């Protein structure tokens, strides 16, 4: 299962970073409740973007309602062509068809990849007929099932990319950064509905080096 391999990669990556990045004695102490207050102040009193925050060692995990939580590449109607277009058609694509007729596409560029599922027209249209009875919208034809991003040429939402420094990253994503956050080496974001993506951002020192995106484990 792709989900299991992604989780294995995450565990391996976190172990490597934990071993290679010892906490400096001069690091400024990061307090969970203070950080939560500061972020909410930066977002504004009426903001509902931050729902949950927990800090454990060098890992900050949040549950949020940010737009990028649901659209990690900044594309609201996700498709292979749109991903290719915003990235200047850098991806190589290989495809396979399952016994159930679903097509899976792997989009690769250097060390990065996106796994994309494509529903057949009959599934999309047939599903829409059932959903329409309950006033739901037509299902998407393409779904991002998982991704590993390690190359700076690939564009993410909020103008985030591999190689961005920590202060710029947090200002672009959660609208707050201060020096106490320098000790954060892993940042995990869950969408508030729990039905879309888990996004894991891993830093090598001050620099974003890896991004993992996958569906929550059932």
Image: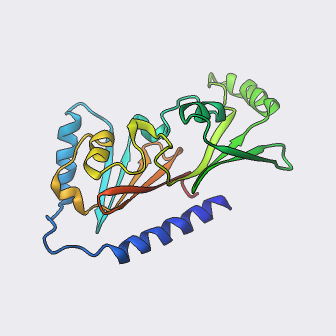
Residue at the location (28% across, 76% down)? 22
For the N terminus, the quadrant is bottom right
Frontmost residue, 9 versus 136: 9
- Asked if 118 appears above or below 216 in the picture, the reply is above
Numbered disc total:
0
Frontmost residue, 131 versus 74: 74
For the C terminus, the quadrant is bottom right
Residue at the location (44% across, 41% down)? 69
Residue at the location (19% across, 38% down)? 42
Image location of residue 93, percent across then percent down: 71, 44
Tell me which colouring the rendered structure shows: rainbow
Image location of residue 21, percent across then percent down: 31, 72
Is residue 137 found left or right of 54 in the rendered image?
Answer: right
- Asked if 40 appears above or below 211 in the picture, the reply is above
Image location of residue 203, percent across then percent down: 36, 59
Frontmost residue, 132 versus 10: 10
């Amino acid at each position: 299962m792709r989900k299991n391999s992604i989780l294995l990669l995450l565990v391996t990556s976190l172990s490597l970073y934990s071993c290679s990045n010892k906490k400096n004695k001069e690091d400024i102490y990061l307090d969970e409740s203070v950080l939560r207050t500061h972020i909410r102040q930066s977002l504004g009193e009426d903001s509902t973007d931050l729902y949950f925050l927990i800090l454990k060692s060098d890992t900050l995990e949040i549950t949020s309602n940010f737009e990028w939580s649901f659209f990690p590449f900044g594309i609201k109607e996700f498709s292979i062509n749109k991903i290719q277009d915003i990235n200047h058609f850098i991806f190589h694509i290989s495809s396979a068809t399952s016994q159930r007729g679903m097509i899976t596409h792997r989009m690769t560029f250097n060390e990065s990849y996106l796994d994309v599922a494509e529903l057949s027209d009959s599934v999309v249209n047939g599903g829409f007929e059932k959903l329409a009875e309950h006033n739901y919208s037509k299902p998407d034809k393409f779904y991002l099932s998982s991704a590993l991003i390690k190359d700076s040429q690939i564009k993410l939402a909020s103008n985030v990319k591999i190689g961005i420094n920590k202060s710029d990253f947090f200002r672009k994503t959660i609208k707050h950064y201060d020096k106490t956050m320098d000790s954060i080496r892993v940042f995990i974001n869950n969408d508030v509905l729990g039905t879309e993506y888990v996004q894991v951002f891993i830093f090598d020192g001050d620099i974003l080096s890896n991004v993992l995106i996958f569906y929550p484990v059932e």
